Image: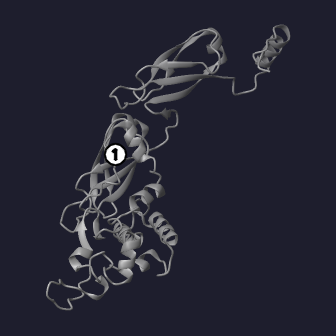
Amino acid sequence: MRDPYEVLGVPKNASAEAIKAAFRRQAKKLHPDANKQDKKAAAKFAELNAAYEILGDENKRRAYDRGEIDAEGKPRFRGFEGFGAGTGPRTGSFADEGIFEAFTFGRGGFHRAGRGRGFGAGIDEILRDVFGGMAGAEAGRQTGFASEDFDAAAQGRNVTGSVTISLNEAAKGTTRRVRLPNGKEVEAKIPPGLVDGQTIRLKGQGLPGPDGTMGDALITVSVAPHPLFKREGADLRLDLPITLYEAVFGAKVRVPTLDGAVELAIPPGTNSGRIFRLRGKGLRNKSGGTGDMYVTVRIMLPERYDPEFEELMRKWRDSKPYDPRKGME
């Protein structure tokens, strides 16, 4: 692997903030979803992640600068100075720490014993922030679905991916093939009721760790905005245009839902802004039930100018005035 500083495009004296900013900038540029025609995009993105795993952690960066680990985070074998009575293998920069004590492979990957964190510290959080998924973990806790716990590091290396689904797919659940940064394609089963920004974990679909154990694939799911419905948890809201005469005389009108259109009875004398509740026409909720749809009627006047209608309104205003804002001041 290339020098991490070269991969991130930063000098060796770059600050931690400059390194983080460079990673964010490169992640946006190199993400495979933004470079679907580039067959090397996944490899470049994986190399970027690996570089930030080194330089994004203060202890590993120091170890790399001292030559104690290589660009992949593996310890460099530097030979033994000899064995003395009661002493173990030593090498200059390890001082009082034996080589096998100073560096170990374990949870989170390669780390210096008793110091710092494992590989990948902060990478998942930054990528979720860059690609709009920062609310995913909290949303997962609220819905009860299996969401990513970013503190529970696996033996292997996790990889991240993202996918966008429609509101209809979020309501009913779906299956999508997702291309990961390592070039692998996986099939992600998305459960009904999943919320925007939630992350799902695909066990064993990541990269192998030092002991051969596979990491997981972390897929952040975005729900595309719907042209008609606004989501509020498991409930949906819809603005329904009606005519003036439907509001005055009452009518039965067709209302779109995710399951198809239904009929709604508008009572005579309905004011604009009145809300009607359609039970069970929302999305799956965390208790296993279904939310509702709230329909707000909006009275719409004719689109084209109509002299006859205008004259009728003028006569009504002059002969039967009323003040709907009375008492507001």
Q: Is residue 173 above or below residue 186?
A: above
Q: Is residue 167 above or below residue 90?
A: above
Image point 32% across, 60% down: which residue? 159
Quadrant housing the C terminus: top right
Could you say where residue 11 lies in the image, as x and y percent from the top left? 49, 81
Q: In the visual, does 274 lie left or right of 328?
A: left
- Crowd around label 1: few <14 · some 14–19 · many ≥20 (10 Å): many
- Res 165 seen here: no
Q: Amino acid at mark 1?
A: Ser
Image point 50% across, 77% down: which residue? 14
The residue carrying mark 1 is 147
Q: Nearer the viewer, residue 19 or 81?
A: 81
Q: Nearer the viewer, residue 77 or 187?
A: 77
Q: Is residue 113 above or below residue 237?
A: below
Q: In the visual, does 236 lie left or right of 313?
A: left
Could you say where residue 184 lies in the image, as x and y percent from the top left? 28, 61
